[in-house]
Amino acid sequence: MQLGEAGVRRIVASAAVAVLGLTGCQGGLEVGDAIAREAELGGLHEAAVAGGFEFQAEILSDGLVSYAEYEAAVFATISCLREQGLRVLGPTESSDGLLAYSYGGAETKKESDAQVVIGDECESRYLNYVSGGYKILHAPSAEEMQQRRLEYAECLHDRGYEIHAGATGPEMDELSSAVDDLTCAIRYSDTMVISGY
């Protein structure tokens, strides 16, 4: 079963990741940085318009993405997936407040590949830019990200791993995945992924 975006399927979050990566965000947008958020949201709106994604362009046109608008985009995506014959489970709310769903059930690699294409098309049409905008507006502050990093390091330390001072999130992920213990990575990944720590 393929994991759906809205916080869980990391591949589909590419629009948001690309936008955040282009701006050099490393640890969440500052809460008061309205100019940067406005520029990023404007870029998402322009991309949605250029791509012909009217549903998303309309949502992004006022420079805001409410939870209701984000939720509508998730449900439009799920409807699209179901209209294309995919079985969809969810959505459910993840620990970071985003909506997660899964789809799939393919029996062969060819069917699975076709489902990924369908999923990407539905998510591109209805969700990616809106999800990116929602994440930009609701990204944790630098202070919140620092607190999450400290909690992540403490979790790893409590599980018996030695963490050097100043270890980055990717270094901590590498450490926890090297021994197939993803407990801490799973616990703290939702918030961290939003800003590409």
Image: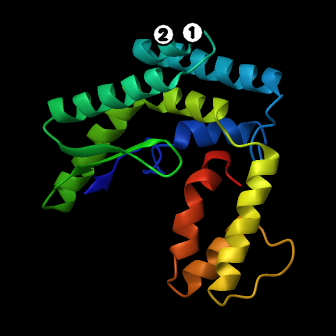
Q: Residues within 10 Å of mark 1 (few under 14, many from 20)?
A: some
Q: Are marks 2 and 1 in contact (CB under 8 Å)?
A: yes
Query: Which element is circle 2 on?
Result: helix
Can you say whether 152 is above or below 64 in the image? below
Can you say whether 72 is above or below 155 in the image? above
Query: Which element is circle 1 on?
Result: loop
Q: Position of residue 194 (x, y in %)?
A: 61, 46
Q: Quadrant of the C terminus?
A: bottom right
Image-based side of 74 in relation to 1, left or right = right
Q: Residue at x 63, y 72 (%)?
A: 173
Q: Position of residue 25 (x, y in %)?
A: 77, 43
Which disc, if any, is residue 58? 2
Q: Residue at x 38, y 34 (%)?
A: 123
Image-based side of 126 in relation to 51, left or right = left
User: Residue 136 appears in which quarter of the rendering?
Assistant: top right
Q: Residue at x 57, y 60 (%)?
A: 189
Q: Amino acid at mark 1?
A: Ser
Q: Residue at x 83, y 28 (%)?
A: 32
Total of numbered circles in the picture?
Answer: 2
Residue indicated by mark 1: 61
| C-alpha separation, residue under disc 2 versus residue under disc 1 | 5 Å
Image-based side of 118 in relation to 33, left or right = left
